[in-house]
Amino acid sequence: MSKKSGYSISRLSRYGLLFTQKISRQGILIHCSSVGEVVAVQTLVERLIQTNPDQGVTISTSTTTGAERVKLLFEDRVKHVYFPYDFPVFVTTFIRRIKPKKILINEMELWPNFSRACSKAEIPVYIINGRMSDKSQKTYKKFPNLFSPMLDSFKAICAQGQRDYDNYLELGVNPNKLFLTNNIKFDLSFSDTDIKTTEVIKNTFAISNRNILVGASTHAPEEQLLIDAYLPLIRQYPNLLLIIVPRHPQRFEKVYQLLKSQNIQVNLMSELKPCEDSTQVLLCNQMGKLRAIYALADIAFVGGSLADRGGHNALEPAAVGVPIIMGPSRYNNPAICAALETAKALRNVENAADIKSAFQDWLNNPTQRKTAGAAGKQVLEQNGGAIEKTLKVIHSQ
């Protein structure tokens, strides 16, 4: 996204200034910090629209990439605004302009002034897919005068896992307001758009006959680790293609230069040129393509897990039967990763040598690879139902 579009007039909503055509008054406001949170609520939003099409839905984000994803996933069926900075005058103005019936805060976006303003305006606020890590719980516990009133003000909190449920209890949340609904990410579905995009990518880049490794949602130094693991493998698998999808668009050019500096034969997805037999890496320098790319993969490395970022969503590759490799940093979704690892759908790696070994084992054993992928799909099937539980809480409280 360009700087001009990123700092357009719509950004004034960060100061509470909204325009009537940009919002759905008297509807549901769902706040998602960034791209990952927007993707996580996709199925929930679809259900809300399906069950009550006359009730407007507005999604707020804190980032321009999150705003882009809202537009990509929902087009004009959902409105978008930027979430206000947490200053009393900004949040009060914001709430008065949008006048939502209910507010759903996804995962872990806790803002004291915003919560206080909603409480004064008698607008019910729900935490959905609530995440409360051990580290965050300890931090919040140090400032009870700030965070206890905020937690008390919520109409209900839907915890995504037992760890989160227990940590909310430890912070003094009323048990009558706390529900273990499990993680809505398990209720994952691929859209018709995702399926069509997979076919377009496969045909545009002429990769239907390639073995494909995906490095997804990567951070530095994960791209280099993937390269170090990949290069020794192409002697055994000359048709092996590595698709790298950096987590943040501001790193696209940096990753491209990293590849070029090592004489890697790389195609940019934005250039729409078919891969040649000599192409080693296809660099996805566009947002919104990751799910479609997962459906092409033989094996996927999920990033943010060797870089200490807590690990990104491992359920997306699992949903399309792709076995998963991750590093040890998984604090964003520990229960999900544990379930996948127990099912042998996910393997732990610590370095480039481990990545190479895991790739090689699954490439050499396609039956084992397919079994691991099928196990991941089964984990989703066994843990589904979080959206129904969440909707029940929202509608009954």
Image (cartoon, grey):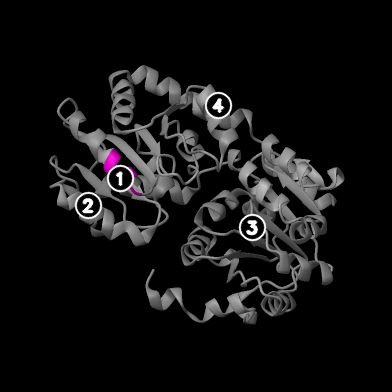
Residue 357 is a magenta residue: no
- Earlier residue among tags 3 and 2: 3
Q: Residues within 10 Å of mark 2 (few under 14, many from 20)?
A: some
Residue 209 visible in the displayed image: no
Label 4 and label 1: CA atoms lie apart by 29 Å
Q: Secondary structure at mark 4?
A: helix
Examine the rendered structure and indicate whether residue 99 appears above or below residue 336.
below
The residue at 80%/66% (across/down) is 123
* Residue 98 placement, left or right of 314: right
Amino acid at the residue labelled 3: Glu
Query: Range of the magenta residues?
Result: 220-225
Please give the name of the residue rendered at 48% of the width and 67% of the height, measured from the top-left corner.
64
Instruction: Find out whether the residues at labels 2 and 4 contact each other: C-beta distance under 8 Å.
Output: no
Q: Marks 2 and 4: which is nearer the front?
A: 2
Picture coordinates of residue 34 (x, y %)? Answer: 53, 59
- Tell me the distance, in whole angstroms, between the alpha carbons under discs 3 and 1: 29 Å
Q: Specify the amino acid type for callout 4.
A: Gln
Q: Gap in Å between the C-alphas at discs 1 and 2?
A: 9 Å
Q: Earlier in the sequence, mark 3 or mark 4?
A: 3
Q: Is residue 126 visible?
A: yes
Residue 258: mark: 2
Which residue is nearer to you in this view: 136 or 200? Answer: 136
Q: Which residue is mark 1?
A: 223
